[in-house]
Image: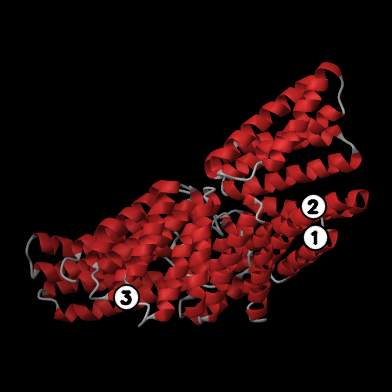
Amino acid sequence: MRVLIGLACALALTATATPTLAQLPAMRDRPLSAAERGRLTELEGQLQRISAQRNTSAAAVRSIARKLGARLTTSSTDEILKLVDEKAGELSAAKSRIAELEGELDSLDSMRLARAVQPLLQAAQTAIEEGELEIAEAKLAEAASQFGTARETLQGRVADLSKREAEILGQQAQVRRAGFDYLGAADLYGKAAELETGDANTRLYFYIHQAENLSFHGVHAVDLTALDRALAVVRDQAIPLTTTADMARYRGAREFYGTIMGNRLMLDPSRQRHQELIELRREILASVDRATEPEEWARQRALVANAEGQLGQEMADRSAVVRAIQGYAEAEPLMTDPQARLRMMHAWANALKHLGSTYGEHDQTLGAIDLFKRAVAEASQEDTFVRAYLLDGLAAAETGAAMHAGDAEMMDQAAEHSRESLALVTREESAMSRAGFSLTLARALGYSARLKGEAGAPHLVEARAALAEAGEVFNRDQAPVDWIWVELEQASLDMTEARIGGDPAAAEAAEARYRAIQAGGARELMPATWVDAKVGEAYALQFQAEHAQGERRRELLTRAQAAWAEALAVAGELGTTTDTYAADAAVTARMLAES
């Protein structure tokens, strides 16, 4: 899932948010630390550049940057500047719209009301220019309140007063969002939507922005309640405002709902929600005429396949993965847009690779390698992010094939492709992308060391370094799924060290990691991965038993046998291949009988 989402971002897919920056700013108005102030000083030149490009005052840009708080010292320069630039553009647009609203006061029925509101809108614009965003918000709130009071006392046309009040609340929401207060912005957009009763499209706009901000907060703060609220807003408020008479809005609202659903599934996988997403994608596909809109049909068909592939890979449903592969094959002949093709080829190859790694269908892994190579060849040399993700996928597929064949040369090739992907992306550009690529490299190096024995010891050192970089980003609290992958690779390296050096202490360390993975929610998040961890625990216990005597040996073998029994039972429920596991479990049983 991580790789799929990462590539989507690289290819500029429509998405409400990605978990690149998982923690929100702390208190909006807390004083900055000395280190945070120092970082602001270092970025002054870049902030001035943003100010000029976005036609936003330097004071306003600095104010936005200050709202980042702790992230000034924990995020990369590229991530900080990207966020500040985005919010500066939004703030500039809000200031321009506030000026337009001030000009529109001339058409207001009540000149008394216009005279009361005009200085407030002027003061809000001045406050934005001076970087006083809280003051700007307060002035906008006061201006909206003037319209609210007039509306309640029937001082003019109620619909017109409501519309103007809603517009001002919408701009207040934009200013609130510039301070990274997504929940506050969402509440204001919701109020604006309720006030706008005359224009369905404007009301739709407000609801979509309410949901967007809820989704931003939900992803960044890992707040499932906020994501559920976002889904409810789109489902219950936005979608009913669309009809097939305006197909762009009809599809757009539903695609947006699917995007939020995908964000929620990223944080909390669920078979039911996966199925809901598939049905939604199918509904959108049904609205597209293949004969008259072939490119759009192919895009939507690929999105259905994406949803089925994610269900299959995360919920261990082979049939769903097979349906995804069939969907990609149907879409490919009509998929002519280069970016969409690469996005689809990446997902398609990952589905093939999954069949190979999970169900022992190794010819599918070879098919994935061929598809990744085709995609790399089609990708532009200038599009470094896309090439990096494709090379990472190629390296992962080659690692799986080399494992099955015991091919050390192919494993070295996989490691080299992984290094190429890392060379294309710096930590400043995307720490999360590099963390994922580092995980792939560590896996290839670890298996290479296993194949080469003592000669592979240097690979273990490089693999540990790669995992250290991945672990800095993929921590247990904010990226629980990716943390599991890191721990799996760490445990695998422990076992490789144990085998190379005949060291039962390393196997004991691996056992502890495997048990921590099981305790860390793997059974619920990724059941197939839980099986991997349980199998790893059995191997680690068996290795320790091989270096133990007497009661200690029997105890370790008894525990290993129990681990095998659990692993085989769950693997059987999931429909994954168990032949190798059963054979190794039989070895443990024989050792126990002989002890």
Amino acid type shown at disc 2 = Tyr
> Mark 1 falls on what kind of element?
helix
Q: Position of residue 311 (x, y in %)?
A: 49, 53
Task: Determine the CA span between mark 3 and mark 1.
Answer: 47 Å
Task: Determine the CA span between mark 2 and mark 3.
Answer: 49 Å
Image disc number at residue 476: none
Q: Position of residue 288 (x, y in %)?
A: 34, 74
- Which corner quadrant holds the C terminus? top right
Amino acid type shown at disc 3 = Ala
How would you rate the neighbour count of disc 1 (Cα within 10 Å): few for under 14, some for 14-19, many for 20 or more?
A: many
Q: Residue reaching furthest top?
A: 551
Assess whether mark 3 and mark 2 are in contact (beta carbons under 8 angstroms).
no
Assess whether mark 1 and mark 2 are in contact (beta carbons under 8 angstroms).
yes
79 vs 339: above or below: above
392 vs 467: above or below: below
Nearer to us of marks 2 and 3 is: 2
Question: Residue 132's quadrant in the figure?
Answer: bottom left
How would you rate the neighbour count of disc 3 (Cα within 10 Å): few for under 14, some for 14-19, many for 20 or more?
A: few
**Which of disc 1 and disc 3 is earlier in sequence?**
3
**Which of disc 3 and disc 2 is earlier in sequence?**
3
The residue wearing badge 2 is 447
The residue wearing badge 1 is 411
Observer-nearest residue: 527 or 331?
Answer: 331
Q: Say left or right for 537 vs 498.
A: left
